[in-house]
Image (tube, helix red, strand yellow):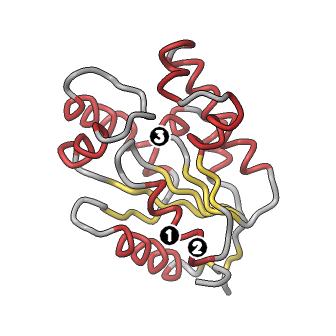
């Protein structure tokens, strides 16, 4: 029997293509995209990079968690681009494991992610060596990402449309019911 969902959540590190893939999925499904960075910027008038610089990393991560929890508390359906930091919090992990939530984990190699990472001024900057930063983040967060039993899609050598195709195929294989896709 198909499992209906209210929220399709894309998780992964910075530079995996969550926002780009989210836009494609939202258009295909006819659902709104709820991107944490965009929602935080609309609420505060500042980018997450500016917030991290002004308030610190912990406060920025609190905002990212509140954005996700607020979105998942709302009625769907929607496609959600979640901040990578949400998997560091048990309340977010619990919400992501909800019955009407499907999770797709977008992965990327640190080298390719770093190239994407550098091209975006709105993202927080974590030093001159983003490859090492992303490799450490991937290692540290992998168990939490895996604990969500997500559909896993590598974005390294795929165009965004192909990433969206792979997400939808993976969800269908799991019997997840998606509206207009």
Numbered mark located on residue 35 in the image: none
Question: In which quadrant of the rendered view does residue 98 lie?
Answer: bottom right
Q: CA distance from mark 1 to mark 2?
A: 5 Å
Residue position marked by numbered label 2 in the rendering:
27
Tag 3 and tag 1, C-beta contact below 8 Å: no
The spot of residue 118 in percent (x, y) is 28, 37
> Would you say the residues marked 1 and 2 are in contact, meaning their CB atoms lie under 8 Å apart?
yes
Identity of the residue drawn at 59% across and 69% down: 26
As drawn, the label of residue 84 is 3
The residue lying toward the viewer, choosing from 68 and 114, is 114
Q: Position of residue 13 (x, y in %)?
A: 39, 43
Given contact means CB atoms under 8 Å apart, are the residues at marks 2 and 3 in contact? no
30 relative to 110, above or below: below
Q: Position of residue 91 (x, y in %)?
A: 67, 36
Quadrant housing the C terminus: bottom right
Give the label, 3 or 1, closer to the camera.
1
The tag on residue 24 is 1
Left or right of 85 in this view: 163: left
Assign the N terminus to one quadrant of the image: bottom right
Residue lying farthest bottom?
Answer: 1
At x 45%, y 75%, the residue is 170
Determine whether 127 is above or below 78 in the image.
above
Instruction: Say which of marks 2 and 3 sits in front.
Output: 2
């Amino acid at each position: 029997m198909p499992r209906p969902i209210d929220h399709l959540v894309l998780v992964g590190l910075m530079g995996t293509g969550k926002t780009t893939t989210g836009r494609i999925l939202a258009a295909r499904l006819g659902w709104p995209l709820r991107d944490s960075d965009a929602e935080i910027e609309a609420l505060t008038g500042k980018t997450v990079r500016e917030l991290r610089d002004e308030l610190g990393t912990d406060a920025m991560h609190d905002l990212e968690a509140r954005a996700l929890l607020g979105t998942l508390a709302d009625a769907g359906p929607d496609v959600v681009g979640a901040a990578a930091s949400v998997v560091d919090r048990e309340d977010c992990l619990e919400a992501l494991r909800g019955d009407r939530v499907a999770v797709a984990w977008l992965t990327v190699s640190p080298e390719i992610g770093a190239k994407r990472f550098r091209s975006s001024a709105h993202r927080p900057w974590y030093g001159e060596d983003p490859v090492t930063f992303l490799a450490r983040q991937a290692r540290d967060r992998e168990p939490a990402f895996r604990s969500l039993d997500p559909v896993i899609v590598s974005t390294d050598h795929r165009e965004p449309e192909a990433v969206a195709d792979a997400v939808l195929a993976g969800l269908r294989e799991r019997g997840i019911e998606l509206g207009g896709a």
